[in-house]
Amino acid sequence: MSQDNLVKFQCTVCKHINYQTKRNKKKVKAKLELKKYCKWCKKRQPHKEAK
């Protein structure tokens, strides 16, 4: 994956960075927010895109 399209997802509850994915920054302007499983919280939590 190229580094310029790579985004990190951070748990909104415990603030751990758990996931990485790619995003087309030219087409998708808004920051992503998804419900993903957090292994520190041990349940599905909302994850926001981090810097």
Image (tube, rainbow, N blue to C red):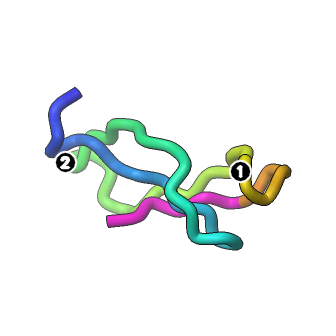
Q: Amino acid at mark 1?
A: Cys
Question: Which sits in the foreground, 36 or 25?
Answer: 36
Q: In percent of the image, x 73 and y 45: which residue is there? A: 37
Q: Which residue is mark 1?
A: 38
Q: Quadrant of the N terminus?
A: top left
Q: Which residue is mark 2?
A: 26
For residue 3, side relative to residue 14 (left or right): left
Indicate whether 41 appears above or below 35.
Answer: below
Task: Give the percent coordinates (x, y) of residue 8.
Answer: 40, 52
Could you classify mark 1 by the number of other residues whose Cα lies within 10 Å: few (under 14), some (14-19), or many (20 or more)?
Answer: many
- Identify the secondary structure beneath mark 2: loop
Magenta region includes residue 49: yes
Magenta region includes residue 47: yes
For residue 4, side relative to residue 27 (left or right): left
Residue, far top:
1
Task: Give the percent coordinates (x, y) of residue 24.
Answer: 26, 40
Residue, far front:
40
- Identify the secondary structure beneath mark 1: strand
Q: In percent of the image, x 49 and y 54: which residue is there? A: 9
Question: In which quarter of the view is residue 50 placed?
Answer: bottom left
Q: In percent of the image, x 58 and y 70: which residue is there? A: 15
Q: In percent of the image, x 56 and y 58: which residue is there? A: 33
Magenta highlight range:
46-51
Name the magenta segment's main secondary structure: strand
Q: Quadrant of the C terminus?
A: bottom left
Question: Which sits in the foreground, 17 or 29?
Answer: 17
Could you classify mark 2 by the number of other residues whose Cα lies within 10 Å: few (under 14), some (14-19), or many (20 or more)?
Answer: few
For residue 20, side relative to residue 43 (left or right): left
